[in-house]
Image (cartoon, grey):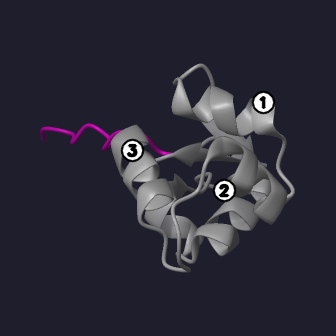
Amino acid sequence: MRYVLRDLDYFKKTMECPGRGAPYTVRDLAEASGVSRSQIGRLLTAELDNLDVNDAHAIAEALGVAVLVIFLPPVSPKQGHAVTETPPYRKE
């Protein structure tokens, strides 16, 4: 199951002003969360837009925010894809 990053700019701002103290560098966040520096770096450069559910929770915990503040969960556990846009409405 993968969680999709909601908003890159907000993620960067949360790293600059986390709920738990001093700003995080990529290295600091990697150490605090246990998520690899390369994954965090790829999130910050928009090369990667999703993470494993455990990594998403670990990053949110390290930043001191709820996971849903920075990540979107999948629509259902079976699908493994997050909703990124609203569904179209049917015209009757």
Instruction: Out of 19 and 74, give the one closest to the viewer.
Output: 19
- Residue 85 lies within the magenta run: yes
* Kind of residue at disc 3: Asp
- Report whether 60 appears left or right of 7: right
* SS class, disc 1: helix
Q: Is residue 79 visible?
A: no
Q: Name the mark on residue 76.
A: 2
* Kind of residue at disc 2: Ser
How packed mark 3 is, by other alpha carbons closer than 10 Å (few <14, some 14-19, many 20 or more), is: few
Q: In which quadrant of the rendered view does residue 34 lie?
A: bottom right
Instruction: Give the image location of residue 82, x and y in percent.
Output: 56, 45
First reached walking from the N terminus: tag 3 or tag 1: 3
Residue at the spot x=45%, y=66% of the render?
69
* SS class, disc 3: loop
Q: Name the mark on residue 38.
A: 1
How packed mark 2 is, by other alpha carbons closer than 10 Å (few <14, some 14-19, many 20 or more), is: few
For the residues labelled 2 and 1, the Cα–Cα distance comes to 28 Å
Residue 46 in the image: above or below residue 13? above
Q: Residue furthest left?
A: 92
Q: Which residues are magenta?
A: 83-92
Of circles 3 and 2, the one toward us is 3
Instruction: Out of 82 and 47, give the one closest to the viewer.
Output: 47
For the residues labelled 3 and 2, the Cα–Cα distance comes to 21 Å
How packed mark 1 is, by other alpha carbons closer than 10 Å (few <14, some 14-19, many 20 or more), is: few
Residue 19 in the image: above or below residue 45? below
**Contact check, label 3 and label 1, Cβ < 8 Å:** no
- Report whether 89 appears left or right of 34: left
Residue at the spot x=71%, y=66% of the render?
57
Q: Name the mark on residue 7.
A: 3
- Our reading of the magenta stretch's main secondary structure is loop
